[in-house]
Image: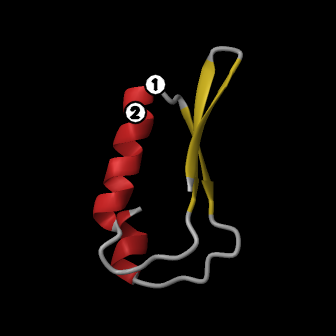
Amino acid sequence: MSKIFDKNGKKTGYLYIYDFPDGMTQALNQKFAEFKSAGAQELILDLRYNYGGSVSSAAAL
């Protein structure tokens, strides 16, 4: 789940990550590219309730 908030001219990307399945690296790269192209200046990574998963996917983050 992701969203971009725009408040007072400052854009913030929000990304909720529930777990780290194998092969998640490409999806993460795509989301970060979307944030960058939208002009996000800050990032909120929501890892609450994340139960873990693939070490390589977590390391890619």
Look at the numbered discs 2 and 1 and tell me whether their residues touch, using CB distance below 8 Å: yes
Residue 36's tag is 2
The quarter of the picture where residue 10 lies is top right
Question: Quadrant where the C terminus lies?
Answer: bottom left
Residue 15: x and y, percent? 56, 52
The quarter of the picture where residue 17 lies is bottom right
Residue positioned 41% across, 79% down in the render: 21
The quarter of the picture where residue 13 lies is top right
32 w.r.t. 52: above or below: above
Residue 5: x and y, percent? 64, 32
Question: Quadrant where the N terminus lies?
Answer: bottom right
Q: What residue type is labelled 2?
A: Lys
1 on left or right of 29: right
Residue 53: x and y, percent? 47, 85
Residue topped by disc 1: 39
Q: What residue type is labelled 1?
A: Gly
Please state the total of marks drawn on the protein image: 2
10 w.r.t. 42: above or below: above
